[in-house]
Amino acid sequence: MSKKIYLITGGAGFIGSNYIRYLFKRYKDIMIVNLDKLTYAGNTANLKDIESSENYIFIKGDICDNGVVNKVFREYHPDYLINFAAESHVDRSIGNPDDFIRTDIFGVYILLEASKELGIERFIQISTDEVYGSIEKGSFTEESSLKPSNPYSASKTGGDRLAYSYFATYGLPVIITRASNNFGPYQYPEKLIPLFVTNALEDKQLPIYGDGRNVRDWLFVEDHCIAIEFILQKGKVGEVYNIAGASEKENIQITNHILELLGKSNSLIHYVADRIGHDRRYSLDASKLYNLGWKQEYEFGDALKETIQWYKENSDWWKPLKSGEYLEFYKKHYGMEL
Ligand code: NAD
Ligand code: TYD
């Protein structure tokens, strides 16, 4: 059997880089092509340990660029395409939705077209639980209606449904995954957990939105990677799979947990104005994936400990990220200096 070729788009970001690392840990006989635009969130340092591998190729390019995407397909003939590429931060989407609509919808279209014209064995669209919107009680199944409520989740919903349409209309072998909030190593320090861990390590304030009681379901990135690979191999085309962490927490609970693990005082907590359109609670029913045979491997508390340890040991990775445009965004967004 010839080597399987994975085209990973957005592989220099948080989840994509963890997925590439996971694939190389698991398989010896694969080839990985990573196509990434290297936006502010893309970082080649995320894959430093891998970049010299002879089975790895990095291409800097935009998934919205038809010429680049077609060239990659013609040159490497990927078997699988896993699309992680996206603008992914809700707060940035509120101020500036433009790039979200481009990458998260139009970019998906370019990838789907290339796959339809040039062939693909599986197209995995990495969607999100945020497409369902907020839920007060109970959990969303894959059959629930989609009610995204901010420009990020609305753009992701566009990409999600566009991918499905290429299955329904053209028979493209598409599978869609909708995971809950990820955390782990290499997450850009603008998202809740890495922002609060790194701020706390520097004795800086932790800005909690609103009353701090919004609920997210937390999934360790390694469990997410295992689930994606499992779905790629075992999932049915045309289907959607929820991927849950089965660890729902209020933001204030997570914050207190982080402070406790770091031995820091909760006087660092600083309540700030609520995010506009802030979804109250996300919750997934992942029975469909459990019934297919996927099992979560990491317990939340252990995974959080491991994650915090990683940020403690890798300040060389995150300190340079908290500079330049980041500081400008921070000041404008939170109304305070970092
Ligand atoms: P991230 O922001 O860390 O990384 C995104 C990557 O995509 C970056 O490397 C960036 O350079 C690249 N990129 C952006 N625009 C591009 C373009 N036009 N062309 C090529 N590359 C481009 O995001 P993440 O947290 O790793 O999320 C990855 C995917 O998983 C996204 O699709 C996101 O919607 C989805 N997701 C994320 C979470 C989460 O909690 N982080 C949860 C569920 C789903
Ligand atoms: P985030 O990590 O941005 O993920 P998402 O909005 O995609 O779920 O935020 C997680 C939760 O934490 C969300 O309810 C917003 C909240 N939050 C804060 O309270 N303060 C912050 O500085 C950030 C970034 C998030």
Image (tube, rainbow, N blue to C red):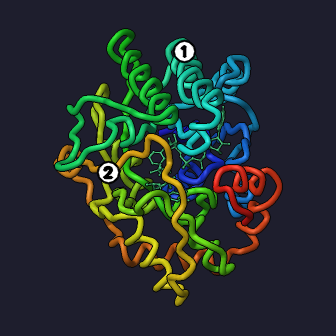
Element type where label 1 sits in the image = helix
Residue 117 placement: quadrant: top right
Q: Residue furthest right?
A: 324
Residue under the image location 31 percent in, 53 percent down:
244
List x then y, in percent, for residue 148: 38, 33
Q: CA distance from mark 1 to mark 2?
A: 35 Å
- As drawn, the label of residue 281 is 2
- As drawn, the label of residue 214 is none
Q: Residue furthest bottom?
A: 263
The answer to which of marks 1 and 2 sits earlier in the sequence is: 1
**The C terminus appears in which quarter of the rendering?**
bottom right
Pick whichever, 234 or 330, lies toward us.
Answer: 330
Name the residue carrying label 1.
Answer: 113
Q: Residues within 10 Å of mark 2 (few under 14, many from 20)?
A: many
Pick whichever, 122 or 258, lies toward us.
Answer: 258
Residue under the image location 27 percent in, 32 percent down:
236
Of the residues shown, which amino acid type is indicated by label 1? Glu
Q: Is residue 170 left or right of residue 108?
A: left
Element type where label 2 sits in the image = loop
Pick whichever, 286 or 76, lies toward us.
Answer: 286
